Amino acid sequence: MSLALTLYRLQQIDSRLSKVTTRLAAIQSTLENNAELKAASRKLDAAKLALREAEKVLKSAEVESASQRIKLEMAEASLYSGRIQSPKELQDLEKDIASLKRHLGALEDLQLEGMISVETCRAERELAQKEFEAVQGKVISENATLQTEQLTLQKEADTLNAQRQAVLPAIDAATLSMYDSLLQKRSGQAVSQVIENACDTCGSSLTPGYAQSVRTSNQLVHCPMCGRILYSN
Ligand SMILES: [Zn+2]
C-alpha cells in the first residue's frame, strides 16, 4: 500500500471518528441537561409555590372571619339577652354590632377573593403538572432513542480507534506529525483526493503532469493551493 493511500485511509478513519466524537458529546450534553424539562420543572415549582401562598392567604382570611363572626354572635347574644337595660349601653352595643358587621363583610370579601385565587392557582398547578409530565414522557422516550444511538456510536468509535491503531505502524513518525499538523491547520482534512485533475477539497486545478505525479511519485505530493497531501486512486 502506498504511503498516500495509507494516509488517505487514516484520513477517512479520522474524519468519521471526528463526526462520531462530536455527536457523542452532543448526545451526552442532551442526556445530562434537558432545557425543556428544566423549564417545565421550574414552571411547576413556581405554580406549586403560588398555590401554597394563596392557600395561606385564604386560611388566614378564614380564621379572621371566623373569629369576627364569634365576636358578632356574642355581641348579638348580649343585645338580645335582656340583661342590658341601660339605653346608653344598648346604643353602644348596637354601634359595636354595626361596626363588627362591616368588618366581617370586608373579611368575607377577602375570603372570597382568596377562594378565587386558590382555585386559579390550583388550575394553573394542574396545568403545569400535566405539561411537566408530557415533557418528561417525551424526554424519556427521546433519551431511550439517544441512548441507543450513543451505544451504536460508542461501538463504532471503538472500531475506528482499532482501525486507526492498525494503520498507524505503516506511517513513519515525521509523516504522521506532518499529517497531524495539517489536520489541525486544514479543518480536520489533511488528505485530499484528486478528482478530474483537481484537488477535491479546495477545488484547485492541477496540470495533467502534476496529477500524474500524484499517481506515480514515491514521494508525497501536496496540493499547490491548500497544501493538503494528495491521493489519487
Ligand atoms: Zn487543495
Image (cartoon, rainbow, N blue to C red):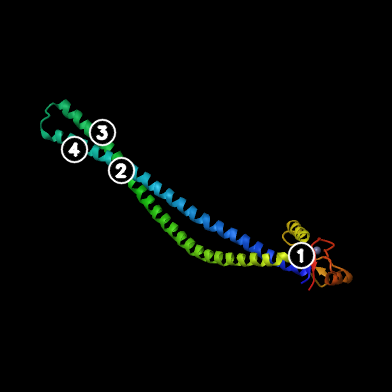
Q: Quadrant of residue 160?
A: bottom right
Answer yes or no: do the residues labelled 2 and 1 have beta carbons within 8 Å?
Answer: no
Name the side, left or right, on which 146 lies relative to 87.
Answer: right
Q: Which residue is mark 4?
A: 73
> Do tag 4 and tag 3 residues touch (Cβ < 8 Å)?
no
Give the mark, 2 or 3, whose residue is nearer the N terminus: 2
| Whether residue 11 can be seen here | no
Circle 1: residue type? Val
Residue matched to label 3: 99
Q: Say which residue appears at 22% left-offset and 39% top-offset.
A: 69
Q: Earlier in the sequence, mark 1 or mark 4?
A: 4
The residue nearer to you, when weighing 157 against 99, is: 157
- Which numbered mark, 1 or 4, is in the foreground of this view? 1
Q: Earlier in the sequence, mark 3 or mark 1?
A: 3
- How much space separates mark 3 and mark 1, taking CA atoms? 94 Å
Disc 4 residue type?
Glu
Disc 1 and disc 4: Cα gap in Å? 96 Å
State how far apart marks 2 and 3 are (Cα).
23 Å
* Residue marked by disc 2: 59
Q: Position of residue 78 (x, y in %)?
A: 14, 33
Residue at the disc numbered 1: 191
